[in-house]
Amino acid sequence: MRWRLAGLSRARDNIQNQLGELVKQKPRNMEDDNLISEIARLEAVLQVSRDDLVRRFPLSLGFSSFLSQVL
């Protein structure tokens, strides 16, 4: 009986160590990080495109009201 408890205790310790290692690992996977990075990149490209569009069409042309509706 005593050897069985020792074996169970070792198994418990091993499982706790494995759990500790899993907790230390990154909570998100690489695919999530890639998607977040791609969204951030696309948002930056969109903002640059919006700024470029505003620069190309002066507000005096009445384009600002159209632009505010579209964007």
Image: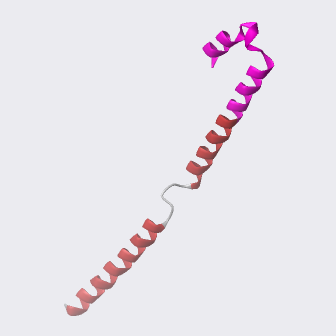
Tell me residue 43's x, y (percent).
Answer: 64, 35
Q: Is residue 7 above or below residue 31?
A: below
Q: Nearer the viewer, residue 5 or 22?
A: 22
Which picture quadrant has residue 7? bottom left
Identity of the residue furthest to the front in this view: 60
Which picture quadrant has residue 8? bottom left
Residue found at x 49% / y 65%: 25
Tell me residue 66's x, y (percent).
Answer: 66, 10
Tell me residue 22's x, y (percent).
Answer: 45, 67
Residue range of the region highlighted in magenta in the rendering: 45-71
Q: Is residue 42 above or below residue 16?
A: above
Residue found at x 77% / y 22%: 55
Which picture quadrant has residue 35? top right
Tell me residue 30's x, y (percent).
Answer: 59, 54
Name the dominant secondary structure of the magenta segment: helix
Name the colour scheme.
secondary structure
The question of residue 57 being in magenta is answered with: yes
Identity of the residue furthest to the top in this view: 62
Q: Is residue 16 above or below residue 63?
A: below
Identity of the residue furthest to the bottom in this view: 2
> In the picture provided, is 54 more to the left or to the right than 8?
right
Number of marks drawn: 0
Identity of the residue furthest to the right in this view: 56
In the picture, the quarter occupied by the N terminus is bottom left
In the picture, the quarter occupied by the C terminus is top right
Residue found at x 40% / y 77%: 17
Q: Is residue 5 above or below residue 70?
A: below
> In the picture provided, is 1 more to the left or to the right than 42?
left
Q: Nearer the viewer, residue 15 or 24?
A: 24
